[in-house]
């Protein structure tokens, strides 16, 4: 595995997460919220963000998977992969979302397929409000229009790992967000 290069340091992440937490605290002005994390990448971001939000809060998690033949990790690193565009739910939320202020927490917004799907699913639960927060955004990769209400960092189309993001399930526990160089 080639050497990883830090793209966004733990200090940069911490200060941006604190800013987003303050924005959410201000925007929801005293109302309770439920954070819904998208498994598995958003778990670490959710844990840090929730501690920067000064509101009554509970947690839930939702899981999704894309149809299509995912290539080997090495091929995915080199060429990326294009799913069929169909997303399916692998784990629904455990609690009722009805009349609640839902904050959907994603690690990365890429093609937009996952968040478009999840937005439809969650709106079907008739929440009082739905806000989307994505730590990372790759706007150049979008296939379906999607804009998060809160974005940590817009990044170029690099393969990134750390702070929840993986390469073949590895590196999720790195404290910094790093680029895995694509083989030449
Ligand atoms: C990643 C990421 C988002 C999705 C974004 O999940 O966590 O859920 O892809 O991609 P999109 O905008 O192109 O739909 P992944 O399938 O890698 O699962 P993971 O969170 O378990 O790593």
Image: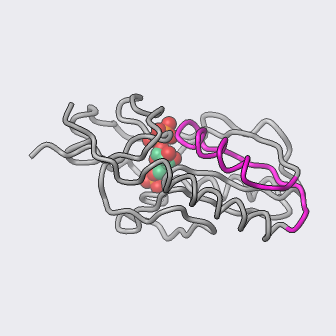
> Residue 86: in sight, yes or no?
no
Query: Could you tell me how many numbered marks the image carries?
Result: 0
Residue reaching furthest front? 11
Q: Residue at x 21, y 30 (%)?
A: 1
Question: Residue 156: which quarter of the image?
Answer: bottom left
Q: In the rendered structure, does residue 39 fall within the stretch colored magenta?
A: yes
In the picture, measured across the screen, residue 152 lies left or right of residue 31, that is left
What's the magenta region?
29-55
Q: Residue at x 70, y 63 (%)?
A: 131
**Which is more toward the observer, 125 or 132?**
132
Residue reaching furthest left? 184
Residue 53 % position (x, y): 76, 55
In the picture, measured across the screen, residue 13 lies left or right of residue 162, that is right
Q: Residue at x 53, y 56 (%)?
A: 135
Residue 144 % position (x, y): 46, 66
From this view, report whether residue 167 is shown above or below residue 112.
Answer: above
Question: Residue 111: which quarter of the image?
Answer: bottom left
Colouring used for the render: one colour
From this view, report whether residue 163 is shown above or below residue 139.
Answer: above
**Which is more toward the observer, 128 or 27?**
27
Residue 160 % position (x, y): 36, 47
Question: Residue 60: which quarter of the image?
Answer: top right
Q: Residue at x 78, y 70 (%)?
A: 27
> Residue 168: in sight, yes or no?
yes
Residue 73 % position (x, y): 28, 33
């Amino acid at each position: 595995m080639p050497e990883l290069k830090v793209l966004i340091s733990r200090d940069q992440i911490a200060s941006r997460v604190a800013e987003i937490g303050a924005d959410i605290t201000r925007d929801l002005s005293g109302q309770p919220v439920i954070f819904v994390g998208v498994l598995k990448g958003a778990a670490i971001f959710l844990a840090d963000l929730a501690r920067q939000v000064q509101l009554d809060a509970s947690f839930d998690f939702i899981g999704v998977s894309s149809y299509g033949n995912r290539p080997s990790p090495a091929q995915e690193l080199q060429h990326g992969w294009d799913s069929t565009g169909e997303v399916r739910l692998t784990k629904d939320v455990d609690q009722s979302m009805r009349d609640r202020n839902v904050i959907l927490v994603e690690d990365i917004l890429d093609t937009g397929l996952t968040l478009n799907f999840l937005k439809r699913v969650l709106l079907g639960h008739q929440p009082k409000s739905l806000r989307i927060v994505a730590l990372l955004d790759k706007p150049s990769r979008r296939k379906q229009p999607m804009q998060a209400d809160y974005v940590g960092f817009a990044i170029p189309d690099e393969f990134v790992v750390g702070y929840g993001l993986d390469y073949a399930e590895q590196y999720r526990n790195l404290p910094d967000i790093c680029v895995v160089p694509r083989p030449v």
